[in-house]
Image (cartoon, helix red, strand yellow):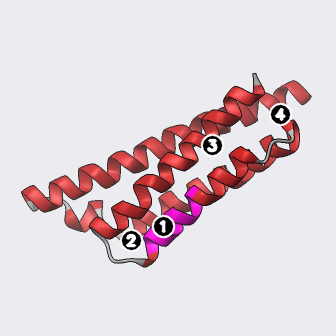
Amino acid sequence: MRDALLAIRDRLDGYGVLLSGLCAVHCVVGLVLVTFLGLGGGVLLSPGVHRIGLALAVAIGIVTLGLSAMRHGRMGPALIGAGGLSLMAAGLVVSHGPAEALLTIPGVALVAFAHIRNLRDAH
């Protein structure tokens, strides 16, 4: 049972890294398409997309980073992840565009870094 839970936690850390990367790509590609080409603004920068992405990131981040902190007793990744999630949440309260990207991209980078540290600490 313990091995199964550890495998699930490792998968969640992997999904966290993937979601963080997808979020960063979404921010950069969205800005490029909207700014330079005038395409996709209604879909790519939709608040609904951001709410869903943030909800997934927060859920996976809280569960995985919390479980990892309890397992190996290292709070560093959890604190780094919490900082990243805070930046992402701040990105939701500013207007869509460059200000949002300046908060969200570093936020997802911190969350991804925290998940990678958890994967390293687990092995």
Tell me the distance, in whole angstroms, between the alpha carbons under discs 1 and 4.
28 Å
Image coords of residue 117 (percent x, y): 66, 35
Image coords of residue 5 (percent x, y): 83, 33
Q: Is residue 28 left or right of residue 104?
A: left
> Residue placed at 72% from the left, 50% from the top?
78
What is the three-letter code of the residue carrying label 2?
Answer: Pro
Q: Is residue 121 left or right of residue 108?
A: right
What is the three-letter code of the residue carrying label 1?
Answer: Arg
Which element type, helix, strand or loop, lies under badge 4? helix
Q: Is residue 56 above or below residue 77?
A: below
**In the current view of this chain or complex, which residue is farthest to the front?**
76
Decide which of tag 2 and tag 4 comes sooner along the chain: 4
Q: Are marks 4 and 3 in contact (CB under 8 Å)?
A: no
Which element type, helix, strand or loop, lies under badge 3? helix
Which label is found at residue 114?
A: 3
User: To which residue does mark 4 refer?
Assistant: 5
Decide which of tag 3 and tag 2 comes sooner along the chain: 2
Membership of 11 in magenta stretch:
no
User: To which residue does mark 2 refer?
Assistant: 47
Is residue 8 at least partly visible in the picture? yes
Which element type, helix, strand or loop, lies under badge 2? helix
Q: Are marks 2 and 1 in contact (CB under 8 Å)?
A: yes
User: To which residue does mark 1 refer?
Assistant: 51
Tell me the distance, in whole angstroms, between the alpha carbons under discs 3 and 1.
21 Å
Q: Report crowding for label 1: few under 14, some 14 to 19, many 20 or more residues within 10 A (C-alpha).
A: few
Tell me the distance, in whole angstroms, between the alpha carbons under discs 2 and 1.
6 Å
Decide which of tag 1 and tag 4 comes sooner along the chain: 4
What is the three-letter code of the residue carrying label 4?
Answer: Leu
Q: Is residue 38 left or right of residue 75?
A: left
